[in-house]
Amino acid sequence: MTDPIVYLNGDFLPLSEARVSVMDRGFLFGDAVYEVIPAYGRRLFRLDEHLTRLDNSLRAIRMENPLSRDAWRDRLQRLTECCPDDDQSIYLQVTRGVGARRDHAIPSGIEPTVFAMATAMTPPAPGTYADGIAAITLDDIRWKLCNIKATTLLANVLARAQASDEGAAEAILVRDGKALEGAASNLFMVANELLITPPKSPLLLPGITRDLVLELADTHGVPWCEAEIHASDLAAADEIWLTSSTKEIMPVTRLNGEPVGNGRPGPYWERMTALYRAFITHTREEHPDA
Ligand code: PDD
């Protein structure tokens, strides 16, 4: 069995040797934030955008970033070089660190725990993009600071489990009648030849893939807007997509057991996914850190 090299608190070491204290607040309280960054051809994709979001998450939980941007770049790049695969997914996590005792109060002067690992980017099973996935809508039971990329993901985990129980791959979370995002993805819909995604707010994660989709829509003249999406709008949508760094742009072709549009990935998805893939290819070949 392979024992990949991971990064922990300044050291590069085999995963089997990486140890974190049980007194770590990440373990005891979920007092931690994270990022998932793709690397295509070992080039970190949208690294600056991910590190800016990390800064925002840390600020929101009253932590300073333990590493400079250059230090992050250096360490993450080194991790990509340790991984045998060209296309990777980099997970990083910063916890508040190890307290002397279990206490909700934030202790002063403790060292954050910094962990990162690179794993092969596993593409979805063949045919997944061509057929699209099934999704369900679910009541959003998460807290009200979903813009923070916090490791406390139990509500998301349970939402995904319920989706799976119902034969679906993802849950679209609905709060006060408004569809906000997936359990681990952002939401887009196409209706009346317009691409629509909910505006950024504390109730959803500001996805890096989401922003790139909007950037590509701008550059290539695809009409789009940010607007609230009501759960009932989804039932009438021509297309629904879910986006994330690991799933890219995933078409949803069944929602709550009913076909979305004609039940096949639609022409807007075809166009946007081609633009997105072309952007990745360009990055892989020419532009480090695009
Ligand atoms: N999750 N919304 C939620 C709740 C997410 O967890 C994610 C990504 C996204 C999409 O964000 P981005 O485009 O920056 O990946 C939206 C990652 C992939 C995860 O938790 O594994």
Image: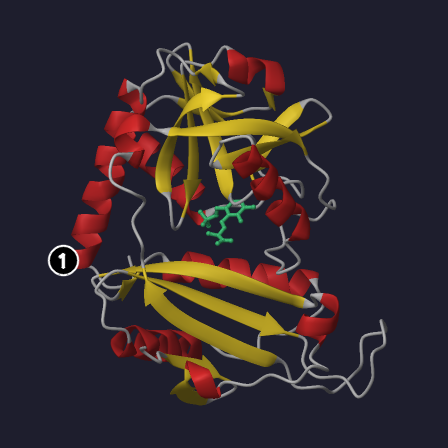
Front residue of 169/5: it is 169
Screen quadrant of the C terminus: bottom left
Say if residue 220 shows up in the picture. Answer: no
Relative to 240, say whether 8 is above or below: below
Q: Position of residue 160 (x, y in %)?
A: 56, 42
The quadrant holding residue 193 is top left
Amino acid at the residue labelled 1: Glu
Q: Secondary structure at mark 1?
A: helix
Residue 286 horizontal side relative to residue 137, left or right? left
Which residue occupies 72% across, 68% down?
A: 62
Which residue occupies 39% across, 35% down?
A: 214
Residue 82 horizontal side relative to residue 60, left or right? left
Relative to 120, say whether 100 is above or below: below
Q: Position of residue 88 (x, y in %)?
A: 30, 62
Q: According to the image, what is the colour scheme of the structure? A: secondary structure
Which residue occupies 50% across, 85% down?
A: 18
Q: Position of residue 124 (x, y in %)?
A: 32, 44
The quadrant holding residue 274 is top left
The residue beneath circle 1 is 285
Residue 33 horizontal side relative to residue 18, left or right? right
Residue 100 horizontal side relative to residue 37, left or right? right
Relative to 261, say whether 139 is above or below: below
Relative to 89, say whether 113 is above or below: below
Say if residue 134 shows up in the picture. Answer: yes
Front residue of 26/229: it is 26
